[in-house]
């Protein structure tokens, strides 16, 4: 077992094949375990179920989590005088993000929870001075949420992404285990890797870039491209790809962790900004939605100032070769058809292009971007995947 102490926040991350030894060393009186019903059915929560009354469970997290069920649960806890000294998140990015928000909500004033307006609740959380201690146990790699101060929820009615940022929602302890890897479908792992790769690049072409995150981003990029290279040669055999990925589980998990460390200091940028309407309107998985734009945004950001940093981090001789390599990988991984499975076409994305400049994300991009330039990126993305130009 390896232990990593976060240089940016009060956080320790354990890399292990068996999380029970770490959990046994953590003492609490009453914990809230946040997860999904599916995780319970797969036995991921058995350790906590054995603790009896020391653990309560909130298993209502959906793929695109909403704020209102979390607020309702927090109100119920306040009304019943229920308190927790630990929130434990067991699941993918949606579970981790929901648990982060719950850790704040459970320490909120009732006046904040009773707000009718969603933005008023989120504004109240920004100014909060307390949160329940948080442990994260990711069952999917890639998001880096276990080491970031960010959480994402969704307003599906208004087709919008909701963001929460607070230093108190960085988990105090994160446990990264390869034990969950075998339960994941190939697509889940692939999209997680695309998310990680995008986060690594976006931390570099970012107005908030700082040299202290360079090593994390560069190591993540090298490892992820190496793994994508290996699986891309297996054509359309997802099962064989899955077997190969299981052998690379430790590397993939670490790369996602490194990408989280990088964006914890910079936030994400244009690819993520463009992805949110795709997810809100068409339910495109997050990693696919942001990763698909990566080669075109790379080309868009290429400049004499930025290129040396990108080439040093990726090990390529030129941005043209890096872009060409990514496009070749994407075509071998059939990303265009994977995107089309969600009913997405170039025309449909163009129709929501005005929603793709998300404040706090698109404006982090190294180069200024407006709606017209975003439309150029959308067109180039489809041209890349259809013709390899």
Image: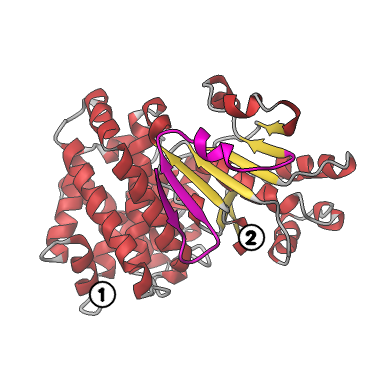
* Picture coordinates of residue 125, whole percent (x, y): 71, 60
Left/right of residue 91 with respect to residue 114 in the rendered view: left
| Quadrant the C terminus occupies | bottom left
Residue 331 can be seen, yes or no: yes
Q: Earlier in the sequence, mark 2 or mark 1?
A: 2
* Picture coordinates of residue 77, whole percent (x, y): 82, 41
* Outermost residue, bottom side: 305
Instruction: Specify the label residue 109 is tagged with.
Output: none
Q: Quadrant of residue 190?
A: top left
Q: For mark 2, give the secondary structure.
A: helix
Query: Which callout, 2 or 1, points to the residue nearer the camera?
Result: 2
Q: For mark 1, give the secondary structure.
A: loop
| Quadrant the N terminus occupies | top left
Is residue 42 a member of the stretch shown in magenta? Answer: no
Q: Which residue is at the front of the view, 353 or 77?
A: 77
Instruction: Specify the label residue 168 is tagged with.
Output: 2
Q: Which residues are magenta?
A: 1-30
Is residue 28 a member of the stretch shown in magenta? Answer: yes
Mark 1 neighbour density, 10 Å: few (under 14) some (14–19) many (20 or more): some
Q: Which residue is at the front of the view, 5 or 67?
A: 5
Mark 2 neighbour density, 10 Å: few (under 14) some (14–19) many (20 or more): many
Q: Which residue is at the front of the view, 72 or 183?
A: 183
Whether residue 376 is situated above or below residue 384 in the rendered picture: below
Left/right of residue 323 with respect to residue 109 in the rendered view: left
* Picture coordinates of residue 323, whole percent (x, y): 18, 58
Query: Badges 2 and 1: C-beta atoms under 8 Å apart?
Result: no
Q: Quadrant of residue 189?
A: top left
* Picture coordinates of residue 159, whole percent (x, y): 58, 48
* Residue found 35% across the figure and 33% down from its top: 187
* Residue found 62% across the figure and 41% down from its top: 88
**Residue at mark 1:** 306
């Amino acid at each position: 077992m390896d232990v990593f102490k976060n240089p940016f926040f009060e956080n320790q991350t354990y890399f292990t094949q068996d999380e029970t030894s770490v959990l046994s060393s953590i003492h609490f009186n009453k914990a809230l375990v946040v997860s999904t019903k599916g995780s319970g059915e797969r036995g991921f929560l058995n350790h906590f179920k054995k603790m009896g009354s020391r653990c309560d469970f909130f298993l209502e997290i959906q793929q695109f989590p909403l704020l209102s069920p979390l607020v309702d649960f927090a109100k119920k806890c306040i009304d019943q005088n229920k308190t927790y000294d630990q929130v434990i998140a067991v699941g993918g990015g949606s579970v981790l993000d929901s648990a982060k928000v719950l850790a704040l909500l459970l320490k909120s004033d009732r006046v904040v929870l009773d707000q009718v307006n969603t933005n008023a609740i989120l504004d109240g959380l920004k100014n909060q001075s307390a949160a329940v201690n948080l442990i994260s146990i990711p069952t999917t790699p890639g998001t880096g949420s276990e080491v970031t101060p960010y959480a994402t929820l969704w307003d599906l009615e208004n087709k919008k992404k909701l963001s929460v940022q607070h230093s108190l929602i960085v988990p105090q302890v994160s446990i990264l285990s390869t034990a969950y890897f075998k339960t994941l479908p190939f697509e889940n792992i692939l999209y997680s890797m695309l998310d990680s790769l995008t986060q690594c690049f976006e931390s570099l072409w970012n107005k908030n870039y700082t040299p202290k995150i360079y090593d994390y981003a560069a190591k993540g990029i090298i490892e992820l491209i190496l793994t994508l290279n290996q699986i891309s040669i297996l054509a359309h055999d997802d099962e064989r790809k899955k077997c190969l990925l299981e052998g690379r589980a430790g590397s993939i998990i670490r790369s996602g962790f490194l990408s989280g460390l990088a964006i914890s200091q910079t936030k994400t940028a244009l690819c993520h900004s463009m992805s949110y309407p795709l997810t809100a309107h068409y339910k495109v998985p997050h990693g696919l939605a942001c990763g698909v734009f990566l080669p075109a945004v790379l080309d868009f950001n290429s400049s004499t100032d930025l290129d040396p940093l990108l080439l040093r981090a990726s090990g390529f001789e030129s941005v043209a070769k890096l872009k060409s390599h990514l496009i070749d990988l994407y075509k071998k991984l059939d990303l265009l058809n994977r995107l089309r499975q969600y009913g997405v076409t170039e025309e449909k994305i163009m129709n929501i292009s005005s929603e793709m400049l998300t404040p706090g994300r698109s404006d982090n991009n190294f180069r200024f971007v407006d709606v017209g330039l975003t439309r150029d990126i959308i067109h180039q993305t489809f041209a890349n995947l259809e013709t390899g130009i």
